Each structure stands twice: as C-alpha cells, then as structure tokens.
Amino acid sequence: MSFNFDERVERNHTDSEKWLKYRDQDIIPLWVADTDFRVAPAIQHALLARVEQGIFGYADDQGALPNTTVQWVEKQYHWAINPDWVIPLSGIKPLFSLLQECLLSRDQGSVCHTPIYPPFTQSATHAHRSQRLIPYPLFDDADFLSIPLPALTTRERLLFICNPHNPGGRSYSREALQRLADYAEHYDLWVCSDEIHADLLLDPEHAHTPFASLSPSCAQRSITLLSAAKAFNLAGLGCAVAIIPNNALRERVRHAVAQRMAAPNSLGIVATLAAWQQSEDWLIAQRHYLRTNRNHLVESLQHLPALRMTVPDAGFLAWIDASGLQQVDPHRWLELHGLGLTSGAAFGDPQAVRLNFGCCRALLDQALTRLTHAVTQA
C-alpha cells in the first residue's frame, strides 16, 4: 500500500496548537513536535468505528494495551517483557514531576543532560526538588562517551534519559547506554528513560536499544516510557505506557499514577492499538519520507555556514546552532523572516532553534527558501 505524505493537509481551521500559534500571520509553523501527516488508515478506521458507537464512558482496555506493548517491543526492539510490567498512562509529561515526588524525598534530586526537552528540567522545579544538569555538547560530540559525568552525592537518586534525544535527535549507542548504566549502578540511581521517539530511527541499519534491555540489573532500576504519540502522530489523544520490571518500584509508581493521573481515554487506547497492531507498513513509509526530508535539510544547510545542525538519526526534529547569525534572539529574528521554529532558550541554549521537518516536502521547500533568503541577506 502507498501513502501520500506529500499531501498538504489544511490545519489552520482545526484545533492544532502548532498552526494556531501563527494564525493570520505569514509564518510557517515548524515548531511543536507533531507532524502534519494524516494518521495511518488503520488508525482512522478504528477511530471512526469507535466514534460510531456514540458512547464514551470510562475505558477499560481489558489488558489489550499491556499485551500489545509486549508484542510491539519484542518485534521492534527484540526486548522480551511481561505484560504485568506495563502501566497505562494518559501522558508522559506529568509523570516526570510525579516520579520526583513519589521516588525522592524533599532533600533529594535528579540528574539529566542539557540541552533537553524542557519538561525534564521543569519537573524538578514543579516538584520542589533539586536537579543537576550535565552539559551535552551536541554540535561537537557524536555520542555521550566523552562527556565527563559528575560525581554525585547521596542526594541524587534519579537519572533522566531521553533516548532518542530531544532536541538533538540522536539515538544512544549501546556503548553510551552502558556507560550511563554503570554510572547509575555506581550511584544507585533509578533511571527514567523516555523513549517515545524510539520508533522513528531514520536509517534502516540502525536499531533502537531500550535502556532496560541492557541487563537484568538495568531492568530492575528502570522506568521506560513509550507511546505511539510521536511515531504515529497521536499526541492529542493522550495514551502512553510505563514499563517497570521491578515489582516494588512498579507498585509505588502505579499507586502514585492512580492517585494523580487520569486513565488513558478510550480513543487514545483505540488509536494506539491500531498503530501497534496494524500500522507498521505506514510507519516504515513515514520513516523513509522523513529520512529524505532530513537529507534535504542537511544538504540545504551545508550552503548556510552561519547555521550548524546536529544531524538527527531519529525523529523529525533538527537542532540548529544559530549563533553564527549574530542575533540576540535568533528565534525572534527567524519569525520576522516568516519561520516559526522552537526557541532553544527553554532547552538550555538561547542561541539555538529546533526545526520540525515532519511536514510535506513542498512546505519544507518553502521554509528552506525563506531560510536561505534570510541568512544570505543578513
């Protein structure tokens, strides 16, 4: 079956956060992390069938979500898990603060790399916990292997990993994960590994390695977060899972989730099941399309030396060092030239921007034309 990722879907008159931000402005939205592609046909058909039932009460998936998670991670990552390890979630962002609160005392804190997806660092503030940040030189280092890992105290108890990395789009090598695993074991850290971009490795020869799959020891200290939201463009439907092999840790998190978070809604469950059970062919086609978009973006930026891009090997987000523009606020400067990217300030680098290339090629070409004109005329 062929899929038309070149279709330009009109999103200006929907409830799209991405497109509403610049409504009635001549600014191309390439910011928040959802794509402009229609979902896989199997997902749309499953949702239509569920909507036709006309009733949307409290949902109980009868174990379908954990069982489908088991099948998906076995097929995609060659990781054998137990369905009892799976906790259904209505989202991932709220869990970051919740973990800080349920696993750490007031005088304990967490550790993570920076720049990183802002909810990681914001979670410590929201939970009134401390956090140590480890700089990750995205533009100068191909992996995490040469980055000094700081000595910790007994106050740090939780390590956050974003694998593949957001905003860098880099997938951790097995060697880098093992280094982090050794670090976590040395300091006896819980490890929360956000792996929601795992299904979007762009190069066919690369395979995703879940942190918890490294060894039984890693599994026993890990909380792995997965969702179909990014790979299948379902972010608005609120469904994810946490995989926690450690029985005591799982029950501790399950109790906190039950007290503080809503259960996944019925449409989110239906969409996720259709994604993981029936839509792999669509996902493979999307990866190919995103790979060609990424390569086109890389080629275009090679002619703009004022911009340096971390070449992503996963996802649809490109992290760009815009310091060569010599603008106080490169994000705002690009907006004035008709480009709505994500500011790097919240990630930890105000001289960087994040570009979402998860769009049809015609829109990406339009954006690159504007970018080239802006930079060459600066």
Image (cartoon, grey):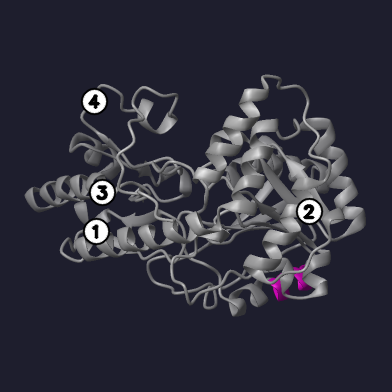
Instruction: Please state which of the two labelled residues, at mark 4 or mark 3, is closer to the viewer.
Output: 3
> Residue at coordinates 52% horizontally, 67% vertically from top-left?
171
Residues at discs 2 and 1 in contact (Cβ within 8 Å): no
Q: Earlier in the sequence, mark 4 or mark 3?
A: 4
Residue 366 on image: x %, y %? 19, 45
Determine the main secondary structure of the stretch shown in magenta: helix
Tell me the CA gap for discs 3 and 1: 17 Å
Tell which circle, 2 or 3, labels the residue nearer the N-terminal end.
Answer: 2
* Residue on which the image places disc 3: 364
Q: Secondary structure at mark 2?
A: helix
Residue 305 occupies which quadrant of the picture?
Answer: bottom left
Residue picked out by circle 2: 67
Which residue in the protein does label 4 denote?
A: 25
Q: Residue at x 64, y 36 (%)?
A: 268
Instruction: Residue type at mark 2: give it.
Output: Asn
SS class, disc 1:
loop
State yes or no: residue 185 in magenta.
Answer: yes
Q: Is residue 24 above or below residue 121?
A: above
Query: Residue 178 location, x and y as percent?
Result: 67, 77
Query: Disc 2 vs disc 4: Cβ atoms closer than 8 Å?
Result: no
Q: SS at mark 3?
A: helix
